[in-house]
Image (cartoon, rainbow, N blue to C red):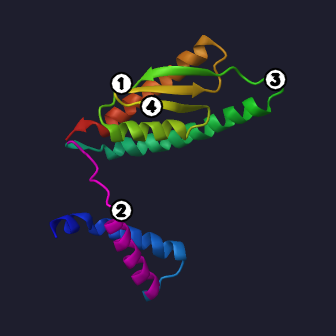
Amino acid sequence: MQGLRARIRPHFVLWLTLMWVILLGEISWGNVLGGLALALLIVLALPLPKVPRDHHRVRWSKLAVFVIVWFGDLIVASAKVAWLALRPAAPPRSAILKVPMRVSNELVLYLATCAYNLQPGGAVTDLDIANREWTIHVLNAETEEDIARERRSVAKLERQMIDIFESRG
């Protein structure tokens, strides 16, 4: 009984129920009860472990600033990639680089990987968790300065993730 009680987390059940009702687009008793039944089935059949927090706290103000700046960078990166695709020149030289990541928490490493992969122009192609190292593909690596700029960009992302998620509470 204790294992069953540990699987049911009320906030997950409410969240899944809400998502079901939003997906169906109409608030009715049937949709709410159906969503509740489906949410209970999901949390019982597919239990997820608790997210390891290691007594860290999230710095919400820095996270908000990061998200706003990240969206601005997304627009700029999208324009740069569009220009590389549409310009009347040969495709740019690309590169595969190995870059270290100093984040200590695997969840933070995952979040950093997602943030990097969602930006056009580069992608994490391999993630070495044991050595905390990314292998990245960089779209525009014409010069050594382009490569150095990308390394600085990854280092900046790493510092931001550490500052936001890995500060001790």
Front: mark 1 or 2:
2
Looking at numbered disc 3 in the image, what kind of residue is underneath it? Answer: Ala
Element carrying mark 4: strand
Q: Estimate the spatial distance between the alpha carbons at disc 1 and disc 4, rounded to whole Å.
A: 9 Å
Closer to the camera: disc 4 or disc 2?
2
Marks 4 and 3, the one that precedes in the sequence: 3
Q: Position of residue 142 (x, y in %)?
A: 67, 16
> Which residue is labeled 3 in the image?
89
Q: Residue 145 vs residue 69: left or right?
A: right
Q: Kindly identify which residue carries mark 1.
A: 131
128 vs 83, nearest the viewer: 128
Residue at the disc numbered 2: 46
Tell me the amino acid under the disc marked 2: Leu
* Residue 98 position (above or below residue 8): above
Q: Marks 3 and 1, how far apart in space?
A: 39 Å
Question: What separation in Å lies between label 4 and label 3 (alpha carbons)?
Answer: 33 Å
Q: Contact, CB < 8 Å: mark 1 with mark 2?
A: no
Quadrant of res 80: top right
Query: Residue shown at 45%/27% (left/top)?
Result: 134
Q: Residue at x 42, y 72 (%)?
A: 18
User: Mark 1 belongs to which amino acid?
Assistant: Asn
Which residue is more in the foreground, 131 or 151? 131
The magenta stretch is: 30-54
Label 1 vs 2, first from the N-terminus: 2
Instruction: Locate residue 127, reporting x and y percent.
Output: 44, 31
Q: Position of residue 112 (x, y in %)?
A: 43, 37
Residue at 34%, 73% in the rendered image: 40
Quadrant location, the C terminus: top left
Which quarter of the image is occupied by the N terminus?
Answer: bottom left
Q: In the displayed orientation, state which residue is furthest to the bottom.
A: 29
